[in-house]
Amino acid sequence: MTGPAGSLDALRDRAERVLMHTYARQPLAIESGHGVWVRAVDGRELVDLVGGIGVNVLGHSPRAVTDALADQSRRLIHTSNLYFTAPQVELAERLVATAFPGRVFLCNSGAEANEAAIKLIRKWGSRHRGGASGIVALEGGFHGRTLGALAATAQRRYREPFEPLPGGFKHVAADLEVIRDAVDDSVAAVLLEPIQGESGVIPLSDALVAGVRSLCDERDVLLAVDEVQTGMGRTGRWWAHQHAGITPDVMTVAKGLGGGVPIGAVLAAAHADVLEPGDHGSTFGGSPLAAAVACAVLRTIEEDHLVERASRLGEYLHESLQSLRSDGVPVASVRGRGLMLGAVLSEPIAARTARAALDCGVIVNAIGDSVLRVLPALTITEEEVDEAMHRLREAFAITRTEGGA
Ligand SMILES: *Cc1c(COP(=O)(O)O)cnc(C)c1O
């Protein structure tokens, strides 16, 4: 060990020995964070455009979260779900108010929220659709790493080593006619992400989302939307499906909900809410601590008008990324919505650029060869976007010099 916090190299060596090698981590060790800034263990300050993969919606260690943690932790941290607690009820009320009438099940992560949704869909199918249990999910979708959520996820590389996975999932192209063909009598629901985050910020068109809604109505199957990454105001609406003017039957939520504290939720409209005592549960789900924090996050987003802000700053960030082109940066297009954006590069330099960006003091996320994903805090300012772009421009200059040499 080299210093009190440990240098990057020392941490990396220790991690190598004791942490499973499940993550290909970037060469950065973070010691603290405030707003959209993080401080590395070597003292450098970086602008964080990844925000814990869309989790830190209010930035790092925001006052609303630290106060709620401190206050609630002195009062009550955990009770189990054998009893009632006020924060859990308030959280469900707040979630429903931003989304659609229905009820909420609280859990601890995105994958868990999708597991609960899968169980709910299956039970609904057995009760209301003659035993249909199938779920149509989309190619390019990502729903988590637990076995059920993984079964819903199409990409082979995530699935293959862990087969057999639970059956009953059909993966089809994000095309209305193809989805229509897949929704036969064996199917109970269609599951989709309004913007596919993990596969490179690929938006489904509003027309497709609305078309799938109509199809589900026609065929009497449930529409489940995975808003784990697109939710909490990030896209400029509370929930991304609202851009398409539709209401789903089931919605899963996690990432930004706790502003950094683990929590997930599934919402179901009354007609889809078939879970009864004994059907599902979670020891930690909706603990007073996590629920109080999530209430504080929802309250802050509302009081500080952060949904509108995500829309406005999202446009600014979108234009800023596009205008990197005038400096010779190979940005082919920018896709996504609000503060969930992907810059598509016309050269396969995403990973090298993300690496160089760390040296230049900005954090972006490379997906595949050619997409840079950004999911900053909804509180980011124009000045911070400008500073991030300045640093990103330098990173591209370094990458392209190396590449062209
Ligand atoms: C991140 C993500 C998940 C999985 O969430 P975890 O909290 O990592 O289990 C599921 N669905 C989508 C769309 C996600 O982006």
Image (tube, helix red, strand yellow):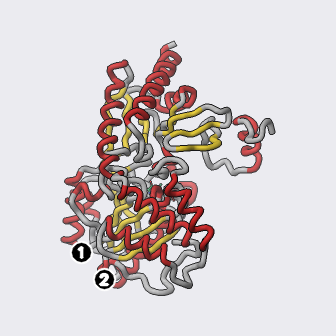
Which one is nearer the viewer's eye here, 54 or 187?
A: 54
Which residue is rendered at x = 57% and y = 65% of the image? 71
Residue 344 higher or lower than 175, as above or below: above
Q: Decide which of 166, 8 is in the foreground and name it.
A: 8
Is residue 120 depicted above or below 23 in this figure?
A: below
Callout 1 amino acid: Asp
Secondary structure at numbered mark 2: helix
**Which residue bears the numbered disc 1?**
220
In the rendered image, residue 121, in percent from the top left (x then y), is placed at: 38, 74
Q: Are marks 2 and 1 in contact (CB under 8 Å)?
A: yes
Examine the rendered structure and indicate whether residue 57 appears above or below residue 137. above
Inspect the image, locate mark 2, and give the three-letter code of the amino acid beneath it.
Answer: His
Q: Residue furthest top?
A: 405
Q: Can residue 94 be seen by looking at this rendering?
A: yes
- SS at mark 1? loop
Residue found farthest to the bottom: 277
Which quadrant of the structure image shows residue 287?
bottom right
Q: Is residue 391 left or right of residue 227?
A: right
Q: Earlier in the sequence, mark 2 or mark 1?
A: 2
Question: Where's residue 231, x and y in %?
Answer: 38, 56
Label 1: how many Cα within 10 Å (few below 14, some 14–19, many 20+): some
Q: Which sits in the foreground, 151 or 328?
A: 328
Splitting the image into 4 quarters, where does residue 330 fall? Answer: top left
The residue that mark 2 highlights is 128
